[in-house]
Image (cartoon, rainbow, N blue to C red):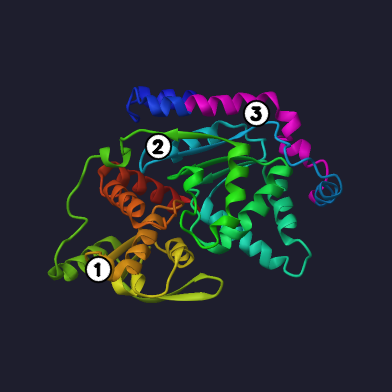
Amino acid sequence: MVEYERRIASGELVDGDSFQLNTIQQLQRLYEELIENEEDCQLDRYKSSEKSGRSRWLWSRLITQPSNYAPVKGLYLYGGVGTGKTMLMDLFYEQMPSNWRKKRIHFHDFMLNVHSHLQMHKGVSDPLDIVAAEISDEAIILCLDEFMVTDVADAMILYRLFRQLFIKGIILVSTSNRTPDKLYEGGLQRDLFLPFIDTLKERCIVHPIGSAVDYRQLGSAEQGFYFVGKHYSTLLKQKLQSLSGDEEPRPQTVEVIMGRKLQVPLGANGCAYFPFEDLCDRPLGAADYFGLFKKFHTLALDGVPKFGSSNRTAAYRFVTLVDKSDDPDLCVDNELGFAKDRTISRLTEINCREYLEDFEAILRQHQQQP
């Protein structure tokens, strides 16, 4: 992991974090095993493409490998907020050869794609088998960020889906805030979900990142991005106007997902203004926020209240909104404690100079693209 060492030397990472170094060793182990078993795992996308995806799917059905087929075990990383799980997984993903069949995606977006493909194959005797075949045709190394199961529909299909994926040779690398045994804890019909946990632990080495350091909160804090008090509404709109440049903010209607439309009270030049109630007191979800932030890179949110038992649902939506604003991270825990810690961590991060400078550079790069 040369890139990791470079970032330590440059001061981007804190030198001597033994928890991250131990995780690097696990990723290095996985990388070396993948190199050693590249042909058996069929990692080379060009060699694999010599057969059409359809024929591979057909033969995978006729000649099913035993359920314990696993030339290389994957890796399941879990730990607290801001400990570097995503950063380390992304470094690992970037270091893998470009000709390998690999995919990096957020878990929530992955499940949205799964449900969409299941709908496309509706009426087929076993649509999950087809979807698993399509996923494995595209990628053998599957990197899933923020593995967190809160939806009963996801929970009910995960065992069958991943059983098929593992049979077809998928190698999973995942990050999560929770150990596998704590996934979907307290969820409906969790007993039907437990076989998935057993399969996950069988196919992946489970590795904790035990660091107590939240690196998101180590940045250089700024002032003036969070305004406390009801009398700041006018100032917030003035800030929005200054960010919008010459374009006058006006009401807009945007399509967010699957034909659903969202009314934007004020929007201009990639910036949007919403009262808190419009985004968090209405029946909106992660997919709506995902669509919104495809249209707008900056959000002014007015009137965020204090959270308690009386507005718990709105608090969950706020957590989802904050997570989604830092695409691609998206995850709402089924216990507000974890969600609260992560949201505070992220709000601190997006208020620091380093984050804003990086965001400005990314935005400028996108604007220069045709």
Q: Where residue 148 sits in the image (x, y, percent)?
A: 48, 52
Residue 184 in the figure: left or right of residue 54 = left
Which numbered dot is residue 32? none
Residue in the image at 68% along x and 48% along y: 163
Residue type of the residue flagged with mark 2: Gly
Residue in the image at 57% along x and 63% along y: 153
Q: Can residue 269 be seen in the rendering of this structure?
A: no
Using the numbered discs, state the Cα–Cα distance from disc 2 to disc 3 in whole angstroms. 23 Å
Residue type of the residue flagged with mark 1: Asp
Task: Give the secondary structure at mark 3.
Answer: helix
Task: Give the secondary structure at mark 2.
Answer: loop
Disc nearer the start of the sequence (2/3): 3
Disc nearer the start of the sequence (1/3): 3
Q: Where residue 349 sits in the image (x, y, percent)?
A: 30, 46
Which numbered dot is residue 84? 2
Residue 237 in the figure: left or right of residue 296 = left
From which residue to which does the magenta span run? 24-53
Q: Where residue 188 sits in the image (x, y, percent)?
A: 51, 63
Quadrant in the picture for residue 83: top left
Counting other residues with Cα less than 10 Å from the Cα at mark 3, is it few (<14), some (14-19), or many (20 or more)? many
Counting other residues with Cα less than 10 Å from the Cα at mark 2, is it few (<14), some (14-19), or many (20 or more)? many
Q: Nearer the viewer, mark 1 or mark 2?
A: 2
Quadrant in the picture for residue 87: top left
Using the numbered discs, state the Cα–Cα distance from disc 1 to disc 2 in whole angstroms. 31 Å
Quadrant in the picture for residue 243: bottom left
Q: Which residue is mark 3?
A: 34
Q: Which residue is mark 1?
A: 302
Residue in the image at 36% along x and 22% along y: 9
